[in-house]
Image (cartoon, rainbow, N blue to C red):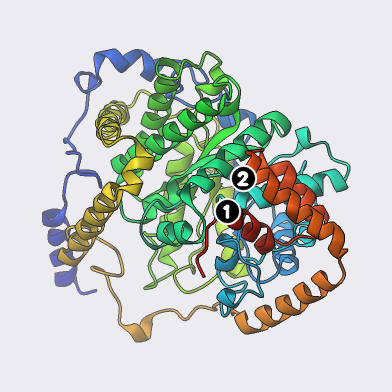
Amino acid sequence: MERAEQIKESVRDSEDQVFETASGIPIEELYGPAHVAEEHRDDAVGEPGDYPFTRGPYRNMYRGRIWTRRFQVGFGSPQESNERIKFLHKHGANGFVITIDLPTSYGFDSDDPIAEGEVGVTGLALSTLEDMRALYDGFGPDTVSYALSIRPPVSSVSLAMLACVAEEKGIPLASVIGTQQNDPFYQMSGGPLQTTTRFFPMQGTLRLCIDNIEFMTNNMPRLNWMVTNGYNLRETGVNAIEDGAFTLGHAFDIFRMAKERGLDINRFPKRASFFLSCSIDFFEEIAKFRAMRRLYARTMKEEFGATDPACQRMRFSVQSAGNTLTTQQPEVNIVRAGIEAMAAVFGGAQSIHLCSYDEGHGLPTEESSRIALRTQQVIAYESGVTKTVDPLGGSYYVEHLTDKIESEINAKLVEIEEHGGMARAIQDGWLEEQINAARYRNQRDLDSGRKPLVGVNRYTIPDEEERRIRVHKIKADEWGEKRSQYLSAFRNNRDNRKWSDAMAHLENAWKAGENMVPVIMNALRNNATMGEIHEVMRNAQNWSFR
């Protein structure tokens, strides 16, 4: 760039800066003691691991244990996904987010006509107990942590599959680790929500969500269950304040339902966890995590009456933001993901997953996955940020921002309650209105340049100078054909009488109001498929979509 152009760009940078956070909170030039609210000063200098957990959920944080370094895995068959898991595990990854394809996510087998063209594309296909066995080939569910990115009603089947695999391997259910997503609304809006409610009744989905919580609380006390998928919610375009409020509001709604079932508030929340996004506004995201922990602790203690500190402690995993990634100059995404991972560390995350730089173009390759892993390892072992607990605690700016975001989230929570709680707000369309307004606001700010996006609305380069990247190839037709052949052989080789009895038991148990997880385990042992199990549960509710 010529000298005159450099000066012009520098002047533009100065003039174009907007001194507010991504959520619109004004940022002053300098912060001091007067900016920290008096009533929160004790929280700011209090001990990590103690109520209200502003400074972290555990006393020694990363000095005692580095966060779990997760990677998203899932394409094609369980066998192919297992190969990628083994590759990443060899390079130092110790946790994996297992994504599933669209047919599986809505409770259909790979050979259902509705699955055509989608088998193995957005994740792996998972239809049988054999599939789950293949996914855990070479690993025990008591040693390697899988987070299954799946929602009710499907998560009831995946949970039953996991329990069956553990039993077959001789592993007590009480020793099983990992995470089961258990968010009945998942993205809470738009197509995903509408599709879910088309294929399975909402009340049935909510019932299975509580069934899962009950089963895990009583039988799998080390297994985390993800009460709210705040990540997918944030990807719709909402800001940090809306993200915090909608995520917590949804969790509190589910907790109320669990209490109505008769579950103990001093037991079931111990393994509740959250899946959150960390976006690019560094300090705002750190403050958001601290504020959410504090609000969660106070609500659990003061509203729900939880007296066990483990039930007041908010724990969460973080994925770097997908909606900050660009297809233009994709290598710059390595920098974005690194900044977001660092914010997650300063915010006290228990598990972190970095998006790979090529995800705007396709599924991550082995090379891009390795770079994402190395980014986390550099932060963990070279940067020095893990050597003391809550290193930004006491920062006038961070404490002021934490207080401000807590106040804003709390105000939004009051608004949610005025709408009858999050479940009602979702079903009535109020949340959809909030999300659409956020989408419009984001696009307007990008189009106007008010929100800078390097490589998109500034610092662009000609198309011919863009780096050509290797894209992971999708084999949807081949995967679909192979899976159809597999499922046909699977059904032909089972004992049809035992299968039929298991299906009848499944229908009767639903109508009797039993916890469905043990019943689904029985069906899986008798070689029922994911799609067949869902079909029986739909029919038991007199629900048809075809």
Residue 283 seen: no
As drawn, the label of residue 372 is none
Say above or below: 74 vs 224: below
Identity of the amino acid at label 2? Answer: Gln
Identity of the amino acid at label 1? Answer: Ile
Q: Dot 2 lies on which element? A: strand
* Quadrant in which the N terminus is drawn: bottom left
Residue 201 image point, x, y percent: 49, 53
**Disc 2 target residue:** 180
Residue 423 seen: yes
Say above or below: 137 vs 282: below
**Disc 1 target residue:** 150
**Contact, CB < 8 Å: mark 1 with mark 2?**
yes
Asked if residue 467 lies left or right of residue 509, the reply is left
Residue 306 image point, x, y percent: 50, 17
- Residue 486: quadrant of the picture: bottom right
Q: Dot 1 lies on which element? A: loop
Comparing 315 with 91, the one in front is: 315
Mark found first going from the N terminus, 1 or 2:
1
Residue at 33% x, 27% y is: 395
Comparing 36 with 4, the one in front is: 36
Residue 484 image point, x, y percent: 71, 78
Q: Dot 1: few (<14), some (14–19), or many (≥20) neighbours within 10 Å?
A: many
Residue at 86% x, 66% y is: 494
Asked if residue 417 lies left or right of residue 273, the reply is left
**Residue at the extreme bottom:** 464
Q: CA distance from mark 1 to mark 2?
A: 7 Å
- Residue 131: quadrant of the picture: bottom right
